[in-house]
Image (cartoon, rainbow, N blue to C red):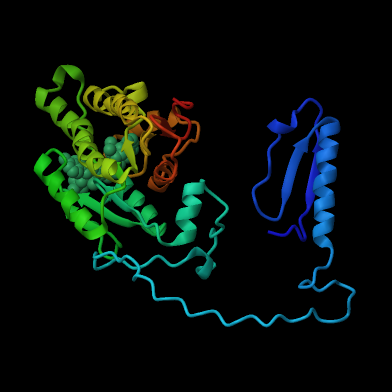
Amino acid sequence: MGLVGTPVTVVMMRGVPPQLAGAGPAGNSVTRQVGGTLGMALAGLILSGAYRARMPTPNCRAPDSGSPPPRRNRPARPPKPPGPPPARCVCPSWRPRPSARSTGRPGADTTIGTSEQREHTMTGTTARSVLVTGGNRGIGLAIARRFVTAGDRVTVTYRGEEPPAGENVLAVRCDVTDGEQVDQAFKEAEAAHGEVSVLVANAGFTQDRLLLRMTEDDFTSVVDTNLTGAFRVARRAVRGMLRAGHGRIVLISSTAALHGAPGQTNYAAAKAGLVGFARALTQELGARDITCNVVAPGLTETDMSRALTPEQRRELLRTTPAGRLGRPEEVADAVAFLAGAGYVRGAVIPVDGGAGLGH
Ligand code: NDP
């Protein structure tokens, strides 16, 4: 690649060895931080290279030459053989994602995000098969929409009502407390979209009671959905991820896992269990390109938080520096990040308006 038009910025920094200095991204702009005499020599080399690259070549019209460059008679290129047709989702509602560059929509800047996200955005051929449990409403639906917008093929599970009409997802009925239904949901997702490479274990519910009034069923049913349900879907997903050598698992926990909350011994225990689960699984998976992370939302504007009494709500807001409830889309942002990150593992990302000050 020529260096024509390459701006070279040399920043002198004493005491910074050149090998530690950051090389700029490949492209038209190179920024280097160099120190000492060696740095000057390097800078000279870069500049002289850039200068040479600015000299006119037989195919490059010099600014003051006044005559067009000589034309080469190239032989015509043979036509490309037709390639295989692009992979298509069998989900009837799935449509290919419009390319960000072709739509020119705001936010289509492909330089933002992790390298994996950039690749995903730019190629248009890497749509992932995503499964979100409890994706018919609330946080799960916001997460599903986020992946659909990114061009992925999304399956959502629901237990009661289907997701709203018009969502570009495959909806599969599945109660995560039933292993057979979990298996069936994965089979349907795989048949429609291919092996699940991103799993979001989001399904959850609360059954709040002070401990002395909490029945064993109150406790075990909450654990069965929030914790054992996540175990069921993660175990089923990891099978395919191991075959594919790639996978992203995100578990939706809660700030209750990290701080506890009165009346939520069952829920806090289940959600805290997800943190241990994710970290143990991270160690089991080792160097494989399969990650498991946790997102811990604070009070978020959904049906679940609407069930709180005004006093509970006031108290929670009092301890939230942001002074407002979270939005489901803000949780979806963190999930999308983790789904595109390969080196973040066993992490817990709070999305709680500062309620836990990072914990
Ligand atoms: P909602 O009550 O709005 O939605 C809960 C979702 O979980 C629904 O899709 C529901 O399906 C599904 N679900 C519940 N039980 C089961 C089950 N046994 N099998 C399959 N699906 C089930 O809750 P949110 O959207 O607010 O919560 C989503 C996740 O975020 C939960 O894990 C919750 O614990 C967590 N969270 C929420 C917070 C909040 O303030 N909203 C705060 C912190 C964490 P269906 O509609 O069919 O019943």
Q: Quadrant of ligand 1?
A: top left
Q: Position of residue 211 (x, y in %)?
A: 19, 18
Q: Is residue 280 left or right of residue 44?
A: left
- Residue 160 visible, this orientation: no
Residue at 81 percent of width and 35 percent of height: 39
| Residue 58 occupies quadrant | bottom right
- Residue 260 visible, this orientation: yes
Residue at 28 percent of width and 47 percent of height: 132
Q: Nearer the viewer, residue 255 or 246?
A: 246
Q: Position of residue 153 (x, y in %)?
A: 31, 58
Q: Indicate the quadrant containing the N terminus: top left, top right, bottom left or bottom right.
A: bottom right
Q: Indicate the quadrant containing the C terminus: top left, top right, bottom left or bottom right.
A: top left
Q: Is residue 63 left or right of residue 159?
A: right
Count every numbered label the image shows and give the total: 0
Looking at the image, residue 294 lies above or below residue 156 = above
| Residue 299 occupies quadrant | top left
Q: Position of residue 79 (x, y in %)?
A: 48, 80
Q: Is residue 231 left or right of residue 140?
A: left
Q: Nearer the viewer, residue 60 or 146?
A: 60
Residue furthest out toward the top: 212
Looking at the image, residue 33 lies above or below residue 213 = below
Residue at 79 percent of width and 49 percent of height: 8
Q: Nearer the viewer, residue 43 or 105?
A: 43
Residue at 24 percent of width and 65 percent of height: 90
Q: Position of residue 51 (x, y in %)?
A: 84, 56
